[in-house]
Image (cartoon, grey):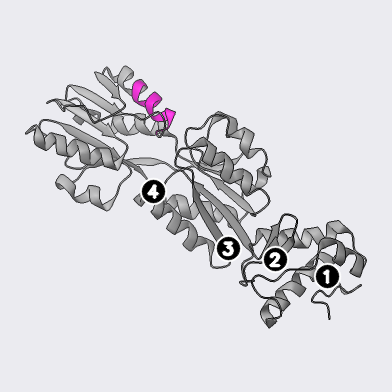
């Protein structure tokens, strides 16, 4: 007896009948992980269907992660959790404590019946491109953190535009996509202005900026702020050979570099806040505690994750700016 049942005039589209038959087979145990499904052509001929009807059913099950196609061999059951109704491709640049907060709030808001697969490109364009190309048509939605890559639209245009959401940075070539993002240029200008009365107590503002990892808007905003405010400034790309001097304020985006500069300050016998200042990016529990508290410019990553999930659930096509705030602590 065939595992696929397709009947006429029952009010349910035929492709949905194929889906229901496979789900029932999984629930009953007649279909298990690793089992091969009948071919597209055999189902077409047996039930007098169009090939597109069968393909529509298989693609639905494929994007939900229930079946997988193997080139030259056919379709196989790979997951017996039929409660999964949608599958999301989530591509981060890297994992850190605040991205983990974003991920956890995103997952908890989505609900149990949406499966999220997370990937990392580690600021490598080849990895970025490969991961997307290998997963075309495998997911219902694609959430992409594009980092500083150029021409990302050439890769993303292979995906359905209404299924793509840009996260964290939105470049000029990606303005056609829905997004939840940070405005790095205006955020650093606005928040440094809030701390201007403290910054003026020092001699020089130093930004540690890595072209590969940090958003260009951060650098542009830093330079605009310093120009308008008349603040002496410097941009460096590494902390390794840097010797902290009395009167400097460091703006440090990366947590590892924050620890390195604190170590160097101790080695040079300078006193944080009195002799030298620090402004870090992205607030964490560690920054509340270390050295009596580190001043941060930070967005709310929990809020970002929740809002992103609601965009998917409500099928919203929007661009939403997730604002940053200044948290003043003992390091200034």
* 202 relative to 91, above or below: above
Q: Is residue 292 left or right of residue 22?
A: left
Is disc 3 placed on a helix, strand or loop? strand
Q: Would you say residue 65 sits in the magenta stretch?
A: no
* 77 relative to 204, above or below: below
Q: CA distance from mark 1 to mark 4?
A: 45 Å
Residue designated by label 3: 114
The dot on residue 12 is 1
Q: Position of residue 307 (x, y in %)?
A: 50, 52
Q: Position of residue 184 (x, y in %)?
A: 41, 33
Q: Position of residue 238 (x, y in %)?
A: 28, 29
The dot on residue 300 is 4
Q: Quadrant of the C terminus?
A: top left
The answer to whether residue 273 is seen in the rendering is no
Q: Nearer the viewer, residue 164 or 51?
A: 51
Label 2 CA crowd tier, 10 Å (few <14, some 14–19, many 20+): many
Q: Position of residue 43 (x, y in %)?
A: 85, 66
Question: Which badge, 1 or 2, is on the more N-terminal residue?
Answer: 1
Nearer mark to the viewer, of 2 and 4: 2
Examine the image and state in which quarter residue 276 appears: top left
Name which residue lies at 62% across and 68% down: 79
Question: Which badge, 3 or 2, is on the more N-terminal residue?
Answer: 2
Q: Which residues are magenta?
A: 214-223
The dot on residue 76 is 2
Is disc 2 placed on a helix, strand or loop? strand
Name which residue lies at 18% across and 48% down: 290
Tag 1 near tag 2, CB within 8 Å: no
Question: Which badge, 1 or 4, is on the more N-terminal residue?
Answer: 1
């Amino acid at each position: 007896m065939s595992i696929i049942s397709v009947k006429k005039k029952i009010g349910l589209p035929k492709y949905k009948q194929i889906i229901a038959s496979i789900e029932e087979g999984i629930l009953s145990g007649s279909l298990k992980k690793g089992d091969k499904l009948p071919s597209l052509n055999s189902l077409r001929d047996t039930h007098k269907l169009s090939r597109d009807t069968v393909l529509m059913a298989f693609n639905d099950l494929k994007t939900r992660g229930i079946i997988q196609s193997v080139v030259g061999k056919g379709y196989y059951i790979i997951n017996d959790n039929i409660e999964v109704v949608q599958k999301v491709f989530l591509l981060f640049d890297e994992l850190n404590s605040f991205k983990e907060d974003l991920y956890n709030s995103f997952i908890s808001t989505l609900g149990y019946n949406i499966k999220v697969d997370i990937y990392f490109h580690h600021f490598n364009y080849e990895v970025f491109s490969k991961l997307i190309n290998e997963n075309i048509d495998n997911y219902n939605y694609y959430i992409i953190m594009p980092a500083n890559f150029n021409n990302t639209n050439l890769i993303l245009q292979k995906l359905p535009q209404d299924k793509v959401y840009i996260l964290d940075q939105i470049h000029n070539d990606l303005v056609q996509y829905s997004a939840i993002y940070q405005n790095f240029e205006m955020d650093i200008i606005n928040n440094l202005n809030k701390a201007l009365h403290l910054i003026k107590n020092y001699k020089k503002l130093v930004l540690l900026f890595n072209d590969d990892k940090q958003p260009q808007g951060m650098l542009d905003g830093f330079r605009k702020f310093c120009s308008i405010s008349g603040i002496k400034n410097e941009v460096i790309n590494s902390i390794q050979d840097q010797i902290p001097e009395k009167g400097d304020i460091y703006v440090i985006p990366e947590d590892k570099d924050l620890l390195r500069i604190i170590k160097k300050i101790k080695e040079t016998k300078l006193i944080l806040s009195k002799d030298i200042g620090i402004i870090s990016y992205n607030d964490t529990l560690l920054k509340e505690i270390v050295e009596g508290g580190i001043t941060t410019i930070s967005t709310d990553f929990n809020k970002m994750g929740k809002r992103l999930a609601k965009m998917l659930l409500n099928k919203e096509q929007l661009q939403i700016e997730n604002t940053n705030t200044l948290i003043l602590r003992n390091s200034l």
